[in-house]
Image (tube, coloured by chain):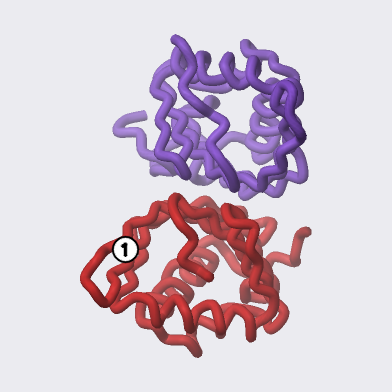
Chain colours: A red, B purple
Amino acid sequence: MQYEPHLDRAALIDLATMQYFGSVDRKDMAATLACFHDEALLCVQTEFTRHAGKAAIKQMFEGFFGAYTSIVHKDFTCTVDEKNGRITASFEAVLTAEDGSVTSLFNTNFWRIRDGKFQEVYVYFSGANVLV
Amino acid sequence: MTDWQEAGVGQEALPYPFYIDIVTKRYFDGVDNKALDQVLDCFTEDAVLTEVTSSTVHTGKAAISAMFTRLFTDFSSIWHGNFVHTADPGSNSVCSQFTVLITPHGGGELRYENCNRFYLKGDKFHRVYVYMSGDNLLKEGEA
């Protein structure tokens, strides 16, 4: 599916890495959810799971934020398809649990943008799914 | 070109259709038809293909060839389709989502929802990262 592109390269990268992951790393639920359309779809492809709609996505993030004391996404490598409103990024996710254990993942996200917000997000994990 | 980096600066942008065509009309067409030479022609000599979800690394065209030879032997039918691409001439890279239908000899059809990230050096794949929604199928072959 293709959506009308509105954001340029810099804006797409800013939305994915700063507005979205910056908000996730601060556990700022309102700012995180502001990146999504109400009827957005977030799929964890490597687990065949999907979270449809903002309420389901919020529930998923409540579990994710509660499971880790520290969440850091870093070292982004972005591929940007400006004409089609799509961006893909690889990154490292460093997740620290209450007991001090650290999980490091090397994931890839695909975002499809409609009117400046996420319409579809696809997540591919290098390890076990943490977005349950 | 000096100090090549994945999606790094200083690379020559190719036409947008090139990225779609090398992924679909050359690479995956070659895989689906078990055309090993066509597949290998997409890679640089020192390319590295990494299956991220199992941390399996195939370094160099010989190792990649051995991996595909095993894949082509182990499976009677391979199909890649339902592609959605993020193609970026500006960074000389293309990332693709797709469905895989693959049938092992004597077994039932398996369905995967995978993605690949392709980083080109010039006009060939230099680094490829594969994420699989199930068990790794890209195992080491006999070089």
Where is residue A76 drawn, in percent x and y? 39, 56
The correct choice, above or below, for A98 with respect to B59 in the image is below
Tag 1 residue: A94
Residue B27, x across and y down, in percent: 65, 26
The image quarter containing residue B30 is top right
Residue B136 horizontal/vertical position (percent): 53, 36
Q: Is residue B12 left or right of residue B84?
A: left
At 54% from the left and 66% from the top, the residue drawn is A12
Is residue B107 something that shows in the picture?
A: yes
Q: Residue at x 47, y 79 (%)?
A: A63
Q: Nearer the viewer, residue B7 or B54?
A: B54
Residue farthest left in this picture: A100
The amino acid type of the residue labelled 1 equals Val
Q: Quadrant of residue B19?
A: top right
- Residue A35 screen position, x and y as percent: 56, 79
Neighbour class for label 1 at 10 Å: few (<14), some, many (≥20)?
some
Looking at the rendered structure, the secondary structure element under dot 1 is strand
For the N terminus of chain A, give its image quadrant: bottom right
